[in-house]
Amino acid sequence: MKRPAARLTSCVLAFGLALASPLAALAQIAPGAHGPVDITADQLEVQQGECSANWTGNAEALQDTSRLRADSLKVFNRQMAGDKGGQSCGALDHMVAEGQVYYVTPTQVVKSDHAVYTASDTTIIMTGDVVTAQGKNVIAGTSLRINTNTGVAVMATGVTGRGAKGRVRGVFYTDNATGQGRSGLAAPVPPPPRHHPQS
């Protein structure tokens, strides 16, 4: 009676690895990086029909010195026609991060409520209450688009017009400036990095 269970476990693991392989090859969450992406979470659920893998519970994708951290991280691979009319899963299409999202590089920290990484144009779009910081300097808005290949980033809110409430706002400190002052903007503090096991 143990053999069918073992066979089922092998199938699930094989499919999980099939989904992960294109991700490691094509995801670029670190600027200029092309190395593997190391993902950890409390739980992994694989949906073969959707070519998706849902990582939940303190999910983190780590590449080089950059990390994408969220309550959940869902990975979608491209659906392709397989042999004999079946379906197979191809390269990474996009990733969706939800709940307490942090994107952290050696030089900046970004916090938002939602983020989508698209492999075809190597962009991360972060939305909701978006706050980005580099040292003490802070910028706030509702949408941030980051191209991880070129390093170009665009912050927006959709609000325009001088004096209008809710426009993009930034607070920048000189070398001798101290304290938060009256800005009301504080740099986001990400959770401590998770040390991924080597084996």
Image (cartoon, rainbow, N blue to C red):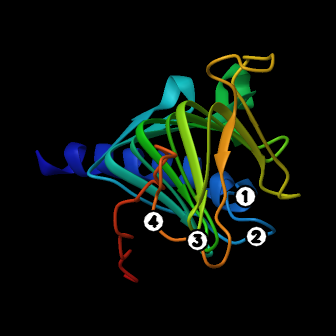
Q: Amino acid at mark 1?
A: Gln
Seen from the viewer's position, the closer of residues 188 and 169 is: 169
Mark earlier in primary sequence (2, 1): 1
Quick one: label 3, few (<14), some, or many (20+) residues within 10 Å? few
Label 1 SS: loop
**According to the image, label 3 marks what residue?**
177
Quick one: label 2, few (<14), some, or many (20+) residues within 10 Å? some
**According to the image, label 2 marks what residue?**
33
Q: Are marks 2 and 1 in contact (CB under 8 Å)?
A: yes
Seen from the viewer's position, the closer of residues 12 and 169 is: 169
Mark earlier in primary sequence (1, 4): 1
Seen from the viewer's position, the closer of residues 88 and 162 is: 162
Label 3 SS: loop
**According to the image, label 4 marks what residue?**
179
Q: Position of residue 154 (x, y in %)?
A: 80, 40
* 24 w.r.t. 185: above or below: below
Quick one: label 4, few (<14), some, or many (20+) residues within 10 Å? few
**Residue 28 - label:** 1
Q: Amino acid at mark 4?
A: Gly
* 133 w.r.t. 57: above or below: below
Residue at (56% x, 53% y) in the render: 20
Q: Position of residue 146 (x, y in %)?
A: 75, 46
Q: Position of residue 132 (x, y in %)?
A: 59, 50
Any part of residue 156 in sight: yes
Distance from Cα at disc 3 to Cα at disc 4: 7 Å
Distance from Cα at disc 4 to Cα at disc 2: 35 Å
Q: Are marks 3 and 4 in contact (CB under 8 Å)?
A: yes
Q: Amino acid at mark 2?
A: Ala
* 173 w.r.t. 73: above or below: below
Distance from Cα at disc 1 to Cα at disc 3: 36 Å
Say which of marks 1 and 3 sits in front.
Answer: 3
Q: Are marks 2 and 3 in contact (CB under 8 Å)?
A: no
